Image (tube, rainbow, N blue to C red):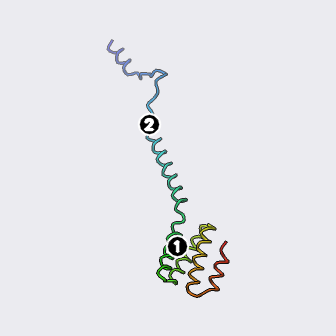
Amino acid sequence: MVAETRKKSSRKRKRPRNQRKPVDRTRMWVLITLGVFVLLGIVSTVAFDDRHWQAFDAAGDVAFERENYKYAERMYNEALQEARNLEDRELIRASLQALSRAYAAQGRSAEARAAQQAAP
């Protein structure tokens, strides 16, 4: 009888068919977290891709207000390069207009006109 009891206890107990196995949710949460980070990375790249242009344009504006037209010209040229890299017509237009102002303030009217006409 003792031998029979041992045999029964060494057998695996089968679960009833309607009872589910416990689910490991760690993998699911890792995938969800990874997906959220990828989505945030994409959104931040799209939302802040013109931050360099904004920095150069703002630096040019400050220099222009201080009547440091050479430095303003340099910053507006950098902003123009960033706008061209981004292929953003509005930023290119704004950069060329600002550059035109800087040229005009230095008495370089021909270059100012050329920059104004180059605007898309």
- The three-letter amino acid code for the residue at tag 2 is Asp
- The three-letter amino acid code for the residue at tag 1 is Asp
Give the answer, above or below, for where 99 lies relative to 47.
Answer: below
In the depicted view, which residue is nearer to us: 13 or 64? 64
**Quarter location, residue 2:** top left
SS class of the residue under badge 1?
Answer: helix
**Quarter location, residue 25:** top left
At 38% across and 22% down in the image, what residue appears?
10
Q: CA separation, marks 2 and 1?
A: 52 Å
Give the answer, above or below, for where 39 lies relative to 11.
Answer: below
At 50% across and 56% down in the image, what residue appears?
41
Residue that lies at the very extreme toward the left in this rendered image: 2
Number of numbered labels in the structure image: 2
Q: Residue 27 placed where, x, y %?
A: 46, 42
Using the image, tell me which numbered label, if any, was put on residue 24: 2
SS class of the residue under badge 2?
Answer: loop
**Nearer the observer, disc 2 or disc 1?**
1
Q: Residue 114 placed where, x, y %?
A: 66, 81
At 52% across and 52% down in the image, what residue appears?
39
Q: Is residue 87 visible?
A: no
